[in-house]
């Protein structure tokens, strides 16, 4: 539809100017309207391109108004922001005037061609339009028809106000109609009195159009509503109603680069009520200037606000990092110190255990070599007979055969002797508290069958008649063997030996056994020949939980274990299991404070369940670890031991002696592990760090409060009226002058 109208307009254009203008050559038609035509021509003397406006229709034209338009343009001559009138041919037929030609076209052409403009370009053009309009108002001329089509652009796209055909003097009462969507709502009235705020509204509409691409309130619906009006009065009324009933335009707020100062200028220019707008264009210019100053001051203001905050932030980050680094390094140093202390304590505990085991070696060796024991042991073996003892190691041995062994009188005498000796070695001596509680003392024949035994609970025949040749305490090997292997395959140990830890079937607690070979002197065949032959093994068993690895350690609280020690020693199985039970034992906890608590006494097979993770075990065998997880804590009953521990471990090695008095040191398949709660080390450091962070936080808040207070004061000062600030300055100056005068007077008096 628009292209068709454009084509019709072009087809109706004149090809010959209505008249010749002396001194000018008219080249082409630039445009035409209701009153006439505008032609582009050339000054024959200077060669300057000009625009000539002809008024073709005298009838219906108010020539006084047209005359006034030209006079108004002439009166504003010299201002570069208003189109300049070069010559007037008012008495010619038809009348005309010559004005400068701007080849860049109008602002409307630019908007149609490029669409919405960037904020910076739109504001620059808007400010120039406002300055030109302010000059016009200063001459007493109101434009009354300001719109993009009436703003021409020079080659640098600087605007020039044109077409003052609807202009009015500020003192006039004659109404003037502008262009829809650029015209203030109160102006759309045939009885309206000209007002400078009409041009203020048009200024806002032009800026809105430059930023959005269309003037405010213009939509297909509003255009359709206005086009269906049957009269000018109805059209104007519909226009007023459309503006007053429509929502305030907000599309400019979504423009990229829009700021609150500029949006406030647009909103105030486009206010629906005249009283809500700027009173004149000068106020618009002042608002633009304030925006410019605010934008120029904004970086400094932001620097003044953000700078201290950024500085505080950087300082806070460095403070936080410094505290964190100091806290971490302090904690690591303390952890390393505790780790070394634990390693020392573990080695000390291992040496203590080694000495205690070696003392047990001496004890049991003395018992095995006593003449009374040798006599009773030999008599018991002889009385039982080789046939009975041989039958007991066979798979088809019967309970009757075991009972026969139990009833042998000489065996009973041997067992009585063992009970007496066992009770004696259990009792403390020399006023010193015994550090070890023994579980049993028994002897085995050369095939590994238990001949006689004494137990701490008073029983004597438990296990008697059964063969235990597969046990490491009998055969002296580094592990228990398969029970299914024939006892004939084993020989009794030749050295005093500490056994592999084994689980008691009666108490469900871990034990170790200290054993030594029983050797009897044979009758010499010559005067120089005296030999001893291994005829059995004596075994002393000890509950591992009865060793005190750290004498100063508190295994549990006085309330029955509800408060656990923060440092404890644990015994760990070091048996790697290279035989039929390979990989099943190493790292198993043999002794732990938790096992002695009442809540653990009735826990089924608890001692066999807790094994250190393979990765942790590797670290413990090396330099230790800061992050040891106690396997006991994985059980509901061991939650008191949850968390990370600092742990180190040391191997137990014992010196053992053969029947020929040969000595050698070998691993006892035991490790002593000392663990300390990591929290006891890190908590004080963390508490110190938290206190430092809290103090730093309060200092930061105080500095922020001071900065905010200073900025509130600065903003308050900046918002004070200029008159008040001037008064304050003048009063300060007056007071200074009075002070100076008073001082002079005082000096005069002193003289």
Image: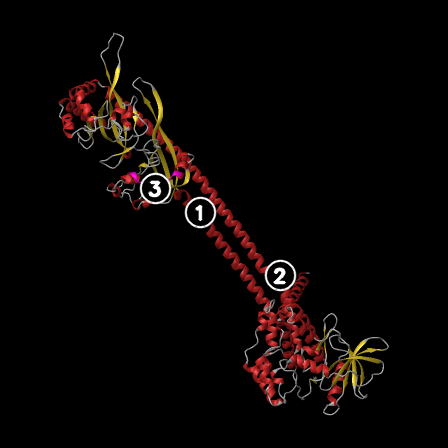
Residue for badge 1:
688
Q: Which of marks 2 and 1 is nearer the N terminus?
A: 2
Identity of the residue drawn at 46% across and 42% down: 330
The residue segment tinted magenta is: 608-614
- Camera-side residue: 271 or 157? 157
Residue 363 visible from this viewpoint: no
As measured in the structure, the alpha-carbon distance from the residue carrying label 3 to the one carrying label 1 is: 31 Å
- Camera-side residue: 111 or 489? 489
- Labels 3, 2: front one: 3
Q: Is residue 610 magenta?
A: yes
Residue for badge 2:
300
> Callout 3: 10 Å neighbours few (<14), some, many (20+)?
some
Residue for badge 3:
631
Q: Which of marks 3 and 2 is nearer the N terminus?
A: 2
The quarter of the picture where residue 98 lies is bottom right
As measured in the structure, the alpha-carbon distance from the residue carrying label 2 to the one carrying label 1 is: 40 Å
Is label 1 in a helix, a strand or a loop? helix
Residue 420 in the image: x percent, y percent?
A: 18, 25
Q: Is residue 220 left or right of residue 35?
A: left
Residue 412 against residue 214 in the figure, above or below: above
- Camera-side residue: 654 or 685? 654
Residue 79 in the image: x percent, y percent?
A: 75, 76
Residue 282 against residue 612 in the figure, above or below: below
Identity of the residue drawn at 25% across and 27% down: 486
Identity of the residue drawn at 23% across and 36% down: 507
As drawn, the residue found furthest toward the right would be 45
Q: Which of marks 3 and 1 is nearer the N terminus?
A: 3
Q: Does the magenta stretch include residue 379?
A: no
Would you say the magenta stretch is mainly helix, strand or loop?
Answer: loop
């Amino acid at each position: 539809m628009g292209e068709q109208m454009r084509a019709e307009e072009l087809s109706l254009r004149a090809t010959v100017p209505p008249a010749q203008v002396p001194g000018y050559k008219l080249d082409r038609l630039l445009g035409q309207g209701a009153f006439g035509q505008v032609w582009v021509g050339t000054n024959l003397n200077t060669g300057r391109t000009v625009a000539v406006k002809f008024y073709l229709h005298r009838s219906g034209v108010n020539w006084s108004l047209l005359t006034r338009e030209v006079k108004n343009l002439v009166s504003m001559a010299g201002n570069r922001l208003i189109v300049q009138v070069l010559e007037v041919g008012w008495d010619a037929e038809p009348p005309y005037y010559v004005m400068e030609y701007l080849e860049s076209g109008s602002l409307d052409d630019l908007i149609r061609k490029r669409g919405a403009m960037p904020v910076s370009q739109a504001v620059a053009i808007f400010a120039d339009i406002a300055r030109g309009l302010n000059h016009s108002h200063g001459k007493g001329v109101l434009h009354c028809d300001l719109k993009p089509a009436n703003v021409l652009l020079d080659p640098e796209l600087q605007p020039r106000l044109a077409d003052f055909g609807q202009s009015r003097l500020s003192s006039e009462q004659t109404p003037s109609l502008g262009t829809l969507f650029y015209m203030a709502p109160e102006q759309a009235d045939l009885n309206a009195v000209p007002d400078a705020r009409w041009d203020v509204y048009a200024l806002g509409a032009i800026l809105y159009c430059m930023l959005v691409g269309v003037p405010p309130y213009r939509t297909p619906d509003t255009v359709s509503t206005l086009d269906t009006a049957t009269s000018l009065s109805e059209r104007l009324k519909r226009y007023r109603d459309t503006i007053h009933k429509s929502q305030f335009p907000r599309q400019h707020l979504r423009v990229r680069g829009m700021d609150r100062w500029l949006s406030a200028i647009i909103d105030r220019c486009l206010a629906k009520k005249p009283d809500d707008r700027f009173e004149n264009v000068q106020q618009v210019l002042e608002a633009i200037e304030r925006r410019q100053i605010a934008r120029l001051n904004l970086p400094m203001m932001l620097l003044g606000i953000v700078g201290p905050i950024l500085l505080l932030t950087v300082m806070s980050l460095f403070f936080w990092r410094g505290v964190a680094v100091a806290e971490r390094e302090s904690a690591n140093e303390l952890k390393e110190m505790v780790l070394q202390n634990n390693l020392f304590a573990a080695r000390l505990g291992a040496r203590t255990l080694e000495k205690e085991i070696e003392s047990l070696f001496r004890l049991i060796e003395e018992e095995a070599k006593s003449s009374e024991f040798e006599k009773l042991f030999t008599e018991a073996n002889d009385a039982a007979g080789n046939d009975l003892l041989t039958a007991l190691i066979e798979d088809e041995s019967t309970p009757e055969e075991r009972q026969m062994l139990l009833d042998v009188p000489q065996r009973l005498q041997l067992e009585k002797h063992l009970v007496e000796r066992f009770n004696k070695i259990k009792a403390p001596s020399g006023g010193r508290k015994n550090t070890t509680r023994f579980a049993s003392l028994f002897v085995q024949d050369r095939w590994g069958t238990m001949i006689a035994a004494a137990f701490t609970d008073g029983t004597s025949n438990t296990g008697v008649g059964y063969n235990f040749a597969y046990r490491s305490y009998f055969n002296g090997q580094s592990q228990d063997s398969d029970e299914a292997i024939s006892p004939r395959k084993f020989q009794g140990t030749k050295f005093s030996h500490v056994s592999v830890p084994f689980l008691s079937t009666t108490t469900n607690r871990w034990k170790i056994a200290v054993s030594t070979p029983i050797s009897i002197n044979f009758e010499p065949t010559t005067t120089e020949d005296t030999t001893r032959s291994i005829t059995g093994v004596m075994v002393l068993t000890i509950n591992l939980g009865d060793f005190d690895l750290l004498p100063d350690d508190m295994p549990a609280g006085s309330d029955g274990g509800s408060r656990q020690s923060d440092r404890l020693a644990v015994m760990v199985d070091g048996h790697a299991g290279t035989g039929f039970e390979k990989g099943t034992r190493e790292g198993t906890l043999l002794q732990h404070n938790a096992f002695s608590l009442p809540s653990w006494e009735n826990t089924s097979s608890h001692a066999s369940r807790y094994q250190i993770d393979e990765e942790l075990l590797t670290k413990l065998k090396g330099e230790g670890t800061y992050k040891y997880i106690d396997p006991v804590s994985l059980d509901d009953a061991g939650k008191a031991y949850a968390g990370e521990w600092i742990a180190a471990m040391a191997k137990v090695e014992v010196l053992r002696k053969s029947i020929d008095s040969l000595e050698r040191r070998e691993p006892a398949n035991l490790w002593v592990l000392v663990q300390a709660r990591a929290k006891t080390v890190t908590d004080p450091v963390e508490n110190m760090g938290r206190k430092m962070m809290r103090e730093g936080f309060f200092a930061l808040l105080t500095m922020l409060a001071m900065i905010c207070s200073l900025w509130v004061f600065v903003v308050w000062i900046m918002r004070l009226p200029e008159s008040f600030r001037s008064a304050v300055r003048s009063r300060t100056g007056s007071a200074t002058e009075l002070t100076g005068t008073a001082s002079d007077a005082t000096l005069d008096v002193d003289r």
